[in-house]
Image (cartoon, coloured by chain):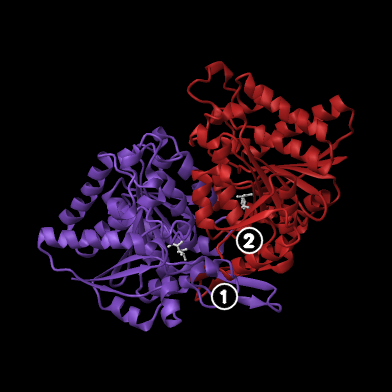
Chain colours: A purple, B red
Amino acid sequence: KKITILPGDGIGKEVTESGKKVLEQIADCFGHDFIFDEALIGHEAIEATGNPLPDETLTKLKNCDAILFGAVGHPKYDNDPSAKIRPEQGLLKMRKELGLYANLRPIKLFDELLEASSIKPEILKGADILFFRELTGDVYFGERGRKDNNDTAYDTMIYSRYEVERIAHKAFKAAQTRSKKLTSVDKANVLESSRLWREVVQEVAKQYPDVKVEHMFVDAAAMKLIQNPKSFDVVVTGNLFGDILTDEASQIAGSMGMLASASVGDTVGLYEPIHGSAHDITGKGIANPLASILSAALLLDISFGLKEEADTVIKAVEQTLKEGYRTRDIADAKTPHEKVLGTEVMG
Amino acid sequence: KKITILPGDGIGKEVTESGKKVLEQIADCFGHDFIFDEALIGHEAIEATGNPLPDETLTKLKNCDAILFGAVGHPKYDNDPSAKIRPEQGLLKMRKELGLYANLRPIKLFDELLEASSIKPEILKGADILFFRELTGDVYFGERGRKDNNDTAYDTMIYSRYEVERIAHKAFKAAQTRSKKLTSVDKANVLESSRLWREVVQEVAKQYPDVKVEHMFVDAAAMKLIQNPKSFDVVVTGNLFGDILTDEASQIAGSMGMLASASVGDTVGLYEPIHGSAHDITGKGIANPLASILSAALLLDISFGLKEEADTVIKAVEQTLKEGYRTRDIADAKTPHEKVLGTEVMG
Ligand SMILES: CC(C)[C@H](C(=O)O)[C@@H](O)C(=O)O
Ligand SMILES: CC(C)[C@H](C(=O)O)[C@@H](O)C(=O)O
């Protein structure tokens, strides 16, 4: 099995090292033969080649069996709205070129971290949400530009029937294996693209009569996620709303540093923490590598069908938390100083 | 002073009655002469006239000194994505026609409600955020439609320089009177309209050197609002992001039932609870009228400059909460049964 490692920018590099080490250990313990390769993306790639997704990277990605990705982004571009070449373009192009239309973001709280969140433990206990974020459509990929002498800027939110259908099917199928409840999030009281979204989800629903579907506006969903996270099970939504809601939902899992994601679609699968490049803590060696490690577990499970191996990784994370070890983001007042670990040691 | 009451749909009707009564009491106590008129909007207006914002309503609104509004919406349209006439069109047209480009949403927790939220009290205590949501631009008003034989739907996210400038100025001015900190929220790493937004906010910032500006991506903001609400003071953002973030932030105030808002711009001001029509509890007499009552306080303050009168209303709300009275949404396990009030009695 060929695995391409894409460390990317900021803490992406730091945490992906741990994810990779875990994959190496698994290969060792279970007698698998994983072949690793590395490639450039994002700011790193711009610096080296001028292109946030060099052709060489794309070729490697198209010819491997799974991808472990870190993050992209750099404050340099964030503070310069007129930059023409940006790290994020590499990420978006990669998602599109690899047909990674379904981004799965499981939000699950390890019992040990019940106290790490800003939300009350009794509200969180038992919360377990699986997000399906559409990843290759919406305002991320619609036409955009300037007019009126640069004084007006626009982006196009756009969805086609087949795009909604394929992600809806994936979400309904997942709902069938869980508690048979699906929440579809849109803004159909205002947006035409959301009305198409709702129409198609209603149609697809007919093929899954055992799944109870609820349609919710994105503003209400943003509120309800915090008010009563346990009222959600599987959630399906568009690219932009998914971006916002899953970051918000990270608080349900105690910290963004715990959340893994899988992006799947037509061919190869890509696995990444949902946190970004986090330049404010880059280079300090304090980033939480568990999201990358849990992403490696998703890789083993979804791309390679190695269920036992994936469970072994998850149990190792659980065990480590049970023994009281924390990175700074998930430590609380009760964590003894010597149990607060840096990225490498935690990895 | 002429005040137009626009009850609208669902619980809008129920709570606005309380808001109006409070305005009547204030007029009585302070010797003001408020002349009330009522008009139709939303589903109610569609049923009566076929138009969610009848001309007669618009004429009344253009000729009064302030508007107290309830909510619009009806499940009938929500479940029918193909409906051509919708209650929300009335709301959006009203905002546009009256030039209500700045929606102020103050998020402040009454001390008595520290326990009512799903967020931990120690995270909330002292949180005090003032949102400026742009209200007459963005994807709410860009061109939208269908193509490819109805199989593709699109909406246009669009901002022009002057739209960003005028809301930014309002937000900077407010920041100057508070803790001199402004957070501007966008998605400039992906969206061109956000890059224009960021550019313009950076420019306007030069005129307010005493205000510290921070730019934040909307996904990060959605996370941080829950993780550390006290890190925000004044927030300025676009129409769609503002819709999502302020509903989410309602959890900081304990309940959506507590949040008032003011929409201002070129002429008359409009005041409304941020909760919607809430058809699930309509007709039960249990809706929390405090958001409408606090909207009436904003009306007195902002549109009429009646600061003392506004404070009197806010103090009355505080006093009522201090005495232990609650509506269902803000009651907790410790609230005695006889202190849980319905809409009318609370009003
Ligand atoms: C970096 C950015 C373009 C990206 C997105 O918005 O999709 C990130 O926030 C994510 O969620 O993967
Ligand atoms: C009813 C709806 C169109 C409206 C909006 O999205 O603006 C509401 O959610 C609000 O926030 O006032």
Q: Which numbered dot is residue A43?
A: none
Q: Nearer the viewer, residue B29 or A272?
A: A272
Label 1: which residue?
A83
Can you tell which quarter of the image residue A307 is in? bottom left
Ligand 1: image quarter: bottom left
Residue A99: image location, x then y, percent: 36, 73
Q: Residue at x 85, y 46 (%)?
A: B64
Amino acid, disc 2? Tyr
Mark 1 or mark 2, which is nearer to you?
A: 1
Mark 1: give few (<14), some (14-19) or many (20+) Cα within 10 Å. Answer: few
**In the rendered image, which residue does mark 2 sit on?**
B140
> Which residue is nearer to you in this view: A42 or A76?
A76
Residue closer to the observer: A92 or B199: B199
Write the residue at 80% across / 37% down: B300
Q: Is residue A145 left or right of residue A133?
A: right
**x, y percentage for residue A12?**
38, 63
